[in-house]
Structures are given as C-alpha cells and as structure tokens.
Image (spheres, rainbow, N blue to C red):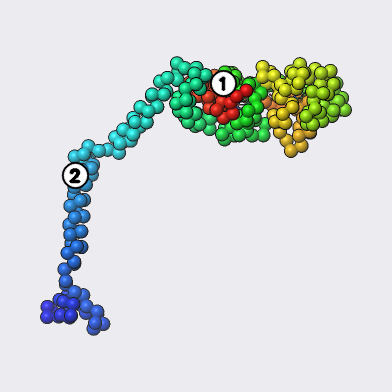
C-alpha cells in the first residue's frame, strides 16, 4: 500500500473510483502554525480570565477580572458624573437650576425618563398633549409658564373650575352667540360676555387668568379641542368644567405629585417642562 503513489505524493491506499485518492501529505506550514497559535491562545486565555470549573468554585484567572466587577466599575463612573450634579440639586431652587446652563442641561436629560414614567400617559410623549389633556410644548399656559408657576402646578396639582351655564343661566340662543363669538375670535366685543359674568374669570379681554386657570378664549388654542370646535365650546359653556352639580361636566384634574415624587424630582420636572415651552 505504501507503494501507492500518484503524482501528488503518498496516498493512504484509499482510492475511489480509480482516480480519487486520499493523500498523506502534511497540511501546509501556515496552517500548522495557525493551529498551534490557536491552542496556545486558548490556554493563555483560560489562565488570564475566570475559566475552569473546580469542585466548589472556579478558577478565577490571573487578571482578577469579573463581569460584575466590570459592570460595577462602569456604574461607579456614571454615578461619579451624576453625583457632581445631583449633590447640588436639593440646595438649589428650580429658578437657580434654570440659570445654570450646565446644570440645566443635565436636569433636562435626566428628567426625560421621569416625564415618560409619570406624565406622558396624560400629556403625551414629550408633552405634545392628548385629547382632554393640555399640551406642554406650546407657550400657552392655563396656570402660567413661569418656572415657579409650573413647579406649583406639579406640586399641588390643578383643578380648573367653571360652573355650568346651561339650563336656567343662559338660553340656547345666548350660548350660541357666545360660542360663535369665541370661535370667531370676537368674544371681547360680545356684550353677553360681560353681562353674563364670564369676564369675572376669563378677564375683560377674554385672555384668561393664570390664577384661576381660566382658558384664553381669544388665541384659538383650545383646551377642549374638537373637530367641531363650535360644538365643543357650546358643550363647555353648557356643562362647565369640574362642576360637581352637572354629571356631564368636563373633567380636568391635574393630580398633585407631592409625596409621590421627591422635591428634587418635582424640581427636575418643572425645569424640564419649562424648557419644553417656557416663557409666559
Ligand atoms: C391623570 C392625568 C395627568 C397626569 C398623570 C399628569 N397631568 Fe398634568 N395636567 C392634567 C390635566 C387634566 C391638566 C389641566 C388641568 C386643568 O385644565 O385645569 C394638567 C395640567 C398640567 C400643567 C399646567 C399646564 C398649563 O397650561 O398651565 C402642567 C405644567 C402639568 N400638567 C405638568 C404635569 C407633569 C410634569 C406631570 C408628571 C409629573 C403631569 N402633569 C401629570 C393631567 C395630568
Ligand atoms: C368661575 C370662573 C369661570 C366663569 C364664570 C366662566 N368660566 Fe369659562 N372657564 C373657566 C376655567 C377655569 C376654564 C378652564 C378649565 C380647565 O381647563 O381647567 C374655562 C374654560 C372655558 C372654555 C373652554 C375653552 C377651551 O379652550 O376649550 C370656554 C369656551 C369657556 N370657559 C367659556 C366661558 C363663557 C362663555 C363664560 C360665561 C358664560 C365662562 N366661560 C364663565 C372659568 C370660568
């Protein structure tokens, strides 16, 4: 069999189909070098890192590396960066945070998650608003857009109140007139607006009062937005807002976060909301 040779070298004697032979030539040198380099690397690797199982534990490796150790090191780095800012927050007012650009940027970034977890369900992601819940990204505020007003809104909650005007207060024709003037942007000139006491809450110019959260009726930014805005305005006038005497009244309840979020978290959110659409 060892005599079995063909033009490529020694064969094992296995020949198929008369021409297909299995040779005994050693693999090429580069391939053998690769093979030895590989197992040497494997041995070094298992010595360096934790590897072999032992009876009650495992070989720890000479490098002292552990996955949890690496994780803890990374976490510590993150916490060190955060601590630099977090330590300042309890001592600073929201207005002071706002005035410090670097601190403000940190707070806006870190409050994003807080907002998503606690506020977005009602106010929409990024504060874009939802039907029945005010947008926080515009410059239109029911209760004022100063940093203090926003902080107060989040801390204590808000509960806008407008009595129902339907039934014996206003006739259908009067509601019709008022609603058309509001949607048409001419409410300040409508005599019923003063005569029926609307100005007591919405102001003589119809622009609303932050202390009451009474909506601005002249800016076409609707608190109760609808495809049929005239019908929506009539509905609000008829049934009021949060009027306990009318079961069809509109609900508008901003919950209080005192006790549910820490003071620092509320401060962060106030800064965040202010930066979404701050100003007046
Ligand atoms: C359960 C629903 C709900 C949740 C949750 C909620 N809000 Fe509100 N929020 C409202 C409603 C409703 C109003 C409007 C109140 C009104 O019309 O009188 C409001 C009003 C506000 C206002 C005043 C807007 C203005 O125009 O003056 C701010 C600011 C605000 N919310 C911030 C937040 C923040 C920050 C969070 C998260 C901590 C949050 N809200 C969570 C329902 C909610
Ligand atoms: C006691 C105070 C009060 C009086 C009086 C009052 N309103 Fe209001 N009104 C409010 C408040 C507060 C809101 C906003 C409610 C909220 O979003 O929490 C409001 C909201 C509205 C809205 C909804 C606006 C929108 O953007 O969707 C309309 C319309 C309205 N009022 C019309 C009137 C008219 C017309 C009168 C007079 C007939 C009147 N209101 C009298 C307090 C009042």
Residue 27 in the image, given as x and y percentages of width and height: 18, 67
Q: Nearer the viewer, residue 77 or 46?
A: 77
In the displayed structure image, the side of residue 272 where residue 39 appears, left or right? left
Q: In what element is the residue under mark 2? A: helix
Residue 153 in the image, given as x and y percentages of width and height: 60, 21
Image quarter of residue 120: top right
Q: Quadrant of the N terminus?
A: bottom left
Question: Which residue corresponds to the image point at 27% horizontal and 38% vertical from the top-left?
Answer: 66
Mark 2 to mark 1: distance in Å? 59 Å
* Identity of the residue furthest to the bottom in this view: 18
In the displayed structure image, the side of residue 112 where residue 179 appears, left or right? right
Question: Which residue corresponds to the image point at 45% horizontal and 18% vertical from the top-left?
Answer: 90
Question: Which residue corresponds to the image point at 76% horizontal and 21% vertical from the top-left?
Answer: 205
Residue 256 in view (yes/no): no
Residue 189 in the image, given as x and y percentages of width and height: 82, 23
Query: Earlier along the polypeptide chain: callout 2 or callout 1?
Result: 2
Q: Nearer the viewer, residue 75 or 185?
A: 185
Mark toward the viewer: 2 or 1 = 1
Cβ atoms under marks 2 and 1 closer than 8 Å: no
* Quadrant of the picture in which ligand 1 is shown: top right
Query: In this figure, which residue is indicated by the disc labeled 2?
Result: 47
Q: Nearer the viewer, residue 202 or 74?
A: 202
Image quarter of residue 149: top right
* Identity of the residue furthest to the left in this view: 3
Residue 209 in the image, given as x and y percentages of width and height: 69, 19
Whether the residue carrying mark 2 lies under 8 Å from ligand 1 is answered with no
Query: In this figure, which residue is indicated by the disc labeled 1?
Result: 147
Question: Which residue corresponds to the image point at 40% horizontal and 20% vertical from the top-left?
Answer: 87
Residue 77 in view (yes/no): yes
């Amino acid at each position: 069999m060892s005599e079995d040779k063909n033009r490529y070298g020694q064969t094992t004697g296995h020949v198929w189909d008369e021409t297909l032979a299995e040779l005994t030539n050693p693999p090429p040198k580069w391939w053998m070098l690769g093979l030895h380099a590989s197992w040497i690397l494997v041995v070094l690797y298992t010595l360096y890192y934790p590897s072999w199982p032992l009876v009650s534990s495992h070989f720890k490796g000479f490098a002292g590396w552990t996955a949890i150790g690496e994780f803890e090191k990374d976490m510590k780095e993150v916490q060190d960066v955060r601590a630099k800012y977090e330590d300042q927050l309890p001592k600073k007012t929201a207005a002071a945070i706002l005035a410090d650009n670097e601190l403000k940027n940190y707070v806006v970034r870190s409050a994003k998650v807080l907002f998503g977890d606690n506020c977005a369900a009602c106010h929409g992601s990024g504060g874009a608003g939802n039907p029945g819940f005010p947008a926080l990204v515009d410059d239109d505020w029911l209760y004022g857009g100063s940093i203090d007003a926003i902080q107060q809104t989040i801390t204590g909650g808000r509960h806008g109140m407008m009595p129902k005007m339907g039934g014996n207060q206003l006739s259908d024709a009067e509601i019709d007139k008022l609603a058309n003037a509001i949607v048409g942007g001419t409410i300040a000139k409508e005599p019923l607006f003063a005569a029926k006491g609307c100005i007591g809450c919405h102001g003589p110019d119809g622009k609303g009062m932050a202390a009451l959260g009474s909506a601005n009726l002249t800016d076409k930014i609707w608190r109760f937005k609808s495809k049929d805005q005239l019908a929506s305005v009539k509905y609000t006038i008829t049934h009021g807002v949060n009027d306990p005497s009318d079961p069809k009244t509109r609900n508008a309840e901003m919950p209080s976060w005192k006790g549910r979020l820490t003071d620092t978290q509320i401060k962060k959110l106030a800064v965040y909301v202010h930066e979404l659409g701050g100003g007046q």
